[in-house]
Image: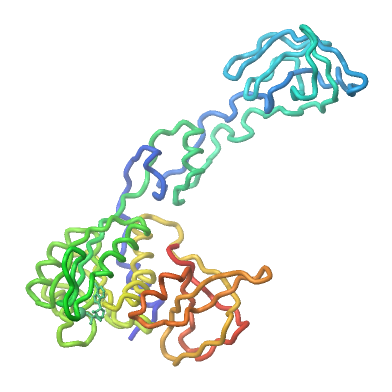
Amino acid sequence: MIEVHEALEIILSKIHFKGIEKVPIDQALGRVLCEDIIARRPNPPLDNSAMDGYALIASDIKNATPENPVELIVSDEIAAGAIGTVEVKPGHASRIMTGAPIPPGADAVLMQEDTDKKGNSILVKDMAEAGENIRLAGEDVAVDETVILKGCLIEPAHIGMMAVVGRSQVYVSQRPTVAIISTGDEIKDLDEIPTGSCIYNSNGYMLAAQIRSAGGIPVYLGIAPDVEEDLLEKFETAIKCDIVVSSGGVSVGDYDLVKASLKKLGHEMAFWKVAMKPGKPLAFGEIGGKPIFGLPGNPVSSFVSFEQFARPSIKKILGYSNLAPKIVQARLTKTITKKTGRLHFLSCCLGSENGTTTATPNAEQGSGILKSMVSANGLMVFPKDSSEMKEGDQVSVQVLYN
Ligand code: AMP
Ligand code: MG
């Protein structure tokens, strides 16, 4: 049996970046950026007004108050998108809209609310500092500035910035296709009627969602009964994808045929047992250079094994700079015990008490109790050689789906 970190190291050593492709920015959300985004033009391009108001000379109005307003002649009007060419001279102002460029001569913009109109003039009721309400050219983005770094996960603000610098398409990583095979005579699909001890294929659908949330393209191949020929056929189809995940059939039961079938296809098995709970059985290896994850059948085990091994693998294929899940330190809210020898992952709820992050392990932790995962937002890590963690202890929690 190997340790979780050793298993992950072996797996990641066999996983490689897939490649890049160009996409329109409206399809880039959630993808991994594969180029630095560099501005070729400043933003804003010119000094411009942050307010609807009047461009003027600050020293003209330094004594202006509501009781003693200063009168200025309005000699021009500048809309956003226009260029004001009339120079602002002492005793004058130009009407200016938000985003319009500052005309020559002016050094401040006074907001409209601090003025009263009087024919072709305004009465200024407040002073302004030089530079007030002026947004400087390049204050958002300077020429040749790198505004987004390669390797980041593209979020809405990134897409806004791509548009700021005029990029309609960007290079992102190619998403891997991930085949999903569910094994078991007792497993039925959702359009079938389960009789007797049969159950629905919850793993297949859950894995598809995990793959999608990790950035992969799930390829659902349905259910293979516990018959070697059927398994062989499914795996032969599956290895056309970039990665394969199967669930079930990797334990020591009489019908656990996944390992034997994979062997027939030339599967080079790296290992098949990891010192963790849930999720001890894990048949990981390759067929023709394609990584295969034989995940355990119990739903919670399948879920946790995917999160520990398949999600970081998909992240590596996608070119993420950080493959590890997001970890937070939290205060344990109740004492828990276990046997030593295996690293445990407990579904838990992260919360907050008096400004401290707390972690409360869910009451039921069985490998078949998927309900415990439904209410969870974290996986608490209970170290291999520890047998007790006390209320108040600091614990590490992996934030789910990160
Ligand atoms: P196995 O590893 O094949 O012995 O499966 C372990 C347990 O997980 C059994 O109780 C199976 O019924 C259950 N199981 C296996 N595959 C699935 C699946 N796709 N969806 C839900 N439960 C499953
Ligand atoms: Mg089975």
Ligand 1: quadrant of the figure: bottom left
Residue 109 seen in this snapshot: no
Where in the figure is residue 267, as x and y percent of width and height?
Answer: 17, 73
Report the colour scheme: rainbow
- For the residue pair 173 and 305, the one nearer the viewer reads as 305
Task: Please state if 189 lies on the left or on the right of 145 as rendered.
Answer: left
Above or below, comparing residue 200 to residue 151 in the picture? below
Residue drawn at (57%, 29%) of the image: 42
Quadrant of image for the N terminus: bottom left
Q: Quadrant of residue 92?
A: top right
Vertical arrangement, residue 317 with respect to residue 204, above or below: above
Question: Do we see residue 206 in this rendering?
Answer: yes
Question: In terms of depth relative to the viewer, which is nearer, 398 or 209?
Answer: 209
Q: Position of residue 129 (x, y in %)?
A: 82, 28
Which x, y percent locates residue 321? 45, 57
> How many marks overall?
0
Quarter the C terminus occupies:
bottom left
Front position in the image: 390 or 267: 390
Q: Report x, y in % for residue 347.
A: 45, 76
Residue drawn 46% across the image and 31% down it: 166
Q: Residue at x 60, y 79 (%)?
A: 394
The answer to which image quadrant residue 84 occupies is top right
**Image-quadrant location for residue 238:** bottom left
Is 398 placed left or right of 90 in the picture? left
As drawn, 366 above or below 189: below
